[in-house]
Image (spheres, grey):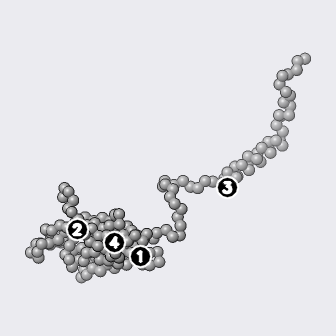
Amino acid sequence: MQTSAVPDLAHTHARPVHWLATATAMAGVIAAAGLLQPKSATASQAGPPQTETAAAPAPDPAAVVLPLQCGGVKSVVTKQGSGDLDGDGGLETVAVARCDAGSGTPPSGIYVLTGGRETPPRVVATLVEPAQKLSVKEFAVRDGAITATLLGYSSPDVPSCCPDELENVKWQWRGGKFVRTAQPEALGN
């Protein structure tokens, strides 16, 4: 009789106790995997961890009574933008508003709003008064500055439908107040 070159594998026959031990071990692994799940995936990039001191949201112009005298008609916010205008880390909102007149070009006001998590929004600066009889054609808030194209009238004889003056202006926070400067007209306008 020849001896086998392969060792005797009699001990490899599975008995019921082996199957029971394997099934118990697999159940333990599956249970542990179920408890140790990764965080949910999101479609945004990871940023710094959120803290309780995160910046308050920009003030909502709808939550403020703007200083417009509209008689019997309501006021309407026609444009708005937000940014940190004074460098304090909080967001301010700039709102362009006018009375909701039925015809002509009603004058606009430009208002800066502030407010925090604990304080209600409020108007802290008026950049253009409606009494100046100006309307706002273009408007932007970016890089800590407010820019606008203002339309006005050269005389009271100019119809309110058709402003005949145009001025590009910019406001920036300097020395504790908003400073207005004239801007050159954009090329191609």
CA separation in Å, label 1 and label 3: 43 Å
Q: The residue under label 3 is which amino acid type?
A: Leu
The residue at the point 50 percent across, 58 percent down is: 47
| 27 horizontally vs 47: left or right | right
Q: Label 4 neighbourhood size at 10 Å, few (<14), some (14-19), many (20+)?
A: some
Residue, far left: 157
Q: Earlier in the sequence, mark 1 or mark 3?
A: 3
Q: Amino acid at mark 1?
A: Gly
The amino acid type found where label 4 is placed reads Trp
**Quadrant location of the C terminus?**
bottom left
Characterize the local packing of mark 1: few (<14), some (14-19) or many (20 or more) Cα atoms within 10 angstroms: many
- The numbered dot on residue 115 is 1
Left or right? Give the position of 114 relative to 107: right
Disc on res. 35: 3
- Give the residue displayed 84% in from the left and 22% down from the top: 5
Q: Nearer the viewer, mark 4 or mark 1?
A: 4
Q: Nearer the viewer, mark 1 or mark 3?
A: 1
Of label 2 and label 4, which has the lower sequence position? Answer: 4
Q: Quadrant of the N terminus?
A: top right
Q: Is residue 146 left or right of residue 4?
A: left
Residue 182 - label = 2
Q: Secondary structure at mark 1?
A: loop
Instruction: First in sequence, mark 4 or 3: give its number.
Output: 3
- The mark nearer the N terminus, 3 or 2, is 3
Label whose residue precedes the other's in the sequence (1 or 2): 1
- The residue sitting at 53% across, 70% down in the picture is 52
How far from the left and from the top, in percent, is residue 126?
Answer: 29, 77
User: Mark 4 — residue?
Assistant: 173
Position above or below: 24 against 177: above
Q: Position of residue 118 (x, y in %)?
A: 47, 77
Can residue 121 be seen? yes
Mark 4 touches mark 1? (CB < 8 Å)? no
